[in-house]
Amino acid sequence: MAAQPPEGDERCAATSQLPNIENATISVPWNELRDLLTKSGRDEREAAPVDHVFSEASYSVTLGERHAAALAEVEVTTLAAGWTLVPLGTADAGIVSAIVNGKRRRLVMRDQSLFTDSRSSWSSMKRPK
């Protein structure tokens, strides 16, 4: 059996607990710190598990004699860095336009679904249906 430090000992030898050494100063050369950060993976930003998140939504429908027009306003937060495609619905859903922050955006069809493009610098978008 390996020797164990006495209970209450402030040392952390190879455990996940850090010692309680308040007001201490530690100096580490940059190349050693860089190597530690690289090994721990903390120098790289973790990617979000999804490209975007849908939150609030409101819907309105206007009925005409021979047709109905629906408008869906959806808040979408883009999490991905750079450009990403935000799904709008299936290609046969009757979606005719997408407006993002007051500007008309292009529709992109991929695998029988419609998307609009988004950039991470946009915080939210409205999605007409």
Image: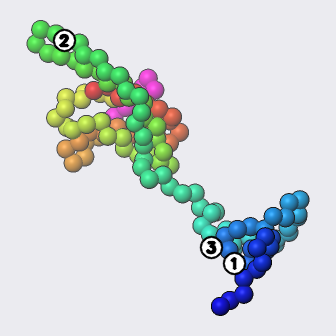
How far apart marks 2 and 3 lie (CA) works out to: 61 Å
Residue at the left extreme, as displayed:
66
Residue 65: x and y, percent?
Answer: 12, 8
Q: Determine which residue is flagged by label 2.
A: 63
The residue depicted at 18 percent of the width and 16 percent of the height is 68
Q: Look at the image and give the residue range highlighted in magenta.
A: 101-107
Q: Nearest the camera: 22 or 118?
A: 22
Image quadrant for the C terminus?
top left
Q: Is residue 63 above or below residue 8?
A: above
Q: Is residue 44 above or below residue 111?
A: below
Circle nearer the N terminus (1, 2): 1
Q: Determine which residue is flagged by label 3.
A: 39
Q: Determine which residue is flagged by label 1.
A: 14
Q: Given the image, on which type of amino acid does mark 3 rest? A: Lys
Q: Is residue 118 above or below residue 32?
A: above
Q: Helix, strand, or loop for circle 1?
A: loop
Q: Given the image, on which type of amino acid does mark 2 rest? A: Leu
Figure quadrant of residue 112: top left
Circle nearer the N terminus (2, 3): 3
Mark whose residue sits in front, 3 or 1:
1
In the drawing, does residue 107 fall left or right of residue 11?
A: left
The residue depicted at 31 percent of the width and 21 percent of the height is 59
How far apart marks 1 and 2 lie (CA) works out to: 70 Å
Q: Helix, strand, or loop for circle 3?
A: helix
Q: Nearest the camera: 109 or 69?
A: 69
Mark whose residue sits in front, 1 or 2:
1
Residue 15: x and y, percent?
Answer: 68, 74
Q: Given the image, on which type of amino acid does mark 1 rest? A: Ala
How far apart marks 3 and 1 lie (CA) works out to: 16 Å
